[in-house]
Amino acid sequence: MAELAEAGVATVYEAAGRFGLVDVDLESLIPGTRVAGPARTALCGQDDNRAVHEVMAHLQPGEILVLVMPEPRPVALFGDLLATQAKARGAAGVLVDASVRDVADLRAMELPVWTRWRRVRGATKNIRGSVDVPVRVGDAEIAPRDVVVLDDDGVAVVPTDRVDATVTAVRERIAKEDGLRERWSAGELSYDAYGLRAEDEVSDQVGR
């Protein structure tokens, strides 16, 4: 988990073959935060957060809470009182495909939270919903125990059966990028290294 968190969303997504991107706009309430952990999911009733209260009883240290509704809307599923429980239970982070409120308090608690919206409109507590079930955020499916990686770039998901292969691919990509970074720092240009200048020169000659 620490390796994937440090690598970050872009590297994990690229190393996984451009697989697992959560392609929706999500805001990190604490910029600069990088976390990763197995998903603990709650599928709430529409505009209702009763399932968020239930999932707290299942939450384990190091997990990422993933809170969704059938239709994403700017209704607050998560605020400071639920965040207090999540932090006490050891959550590594929280992903809310709805809105959160009490933002200043959440930041002061230093609990990493990613959210689609910030709105104060409250949720009801009338629909039980479901916990520990596969959920969708945008076009990405997140199943319980899938690894969720979050940083300022957004969110990526690594299915449980692809974690080992993804970690290996991440290590290889980081080693490759470190080598390229040294070359670019020494003055070499990617325009030449990737053969793009040569291609453009040929194209220019053909166009004359």
Image (cartoon, rainbow, N blue to C red):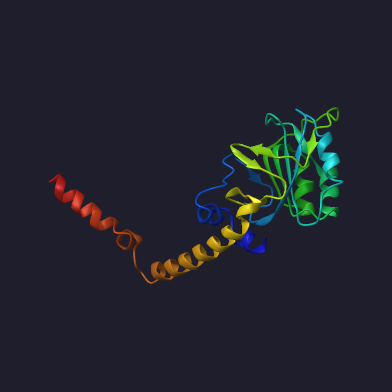
Q: Is residue 179 above or below residue 40?
A: below
Indicate the quadrant containing the N terminus: top left, top right, bottom left or bottom right.
bottom right
User: Which residue sits at x=77%, y=42%?
Assistant: 132
The percent position of residue 26, horizontal first and vertical second, equals 63, 42
Residue that sits furthest to the front in the current view: 161
Observer-nearest of 73 and 169:
169
Q: How many marks?
A: 0
Is 6 placed above or below 84 here?
A: below
Choose between 202 and 164: the one closer to the eye.
164
What is the residue that sits farthest to the left in this orientation? 208
Question: On the image, which quarter does residue 164 sit in?
Answer: bottom right
Is 117 on the left or on the right of 173, as rendered? right
Judge left or right: residue 55 versus residue 185. Answer: right
Q: In this orientation, which residue lies closer to the viewer: 82 or 131?
A: 131
Q: Residue at x 77, y 33 (%)?
A: 44
Across and down, in percent, residue 92 comes to 74, 55
Please give the name of the residue rendered at 49% of the width and 68% of the height, measured from the top-left corner: 175
Q: Position of residue 156 (x, y in %)?
A: 60, 49
Direction from residue 182 to residue 45 in the image, left or right: right
Among the 4 quarters of the image, the one containing residue 166: bottom right
Relative depth, front residue between 186 and 89? 89
- Residue 158: horizontal and vertical position, in percent? 62, 51
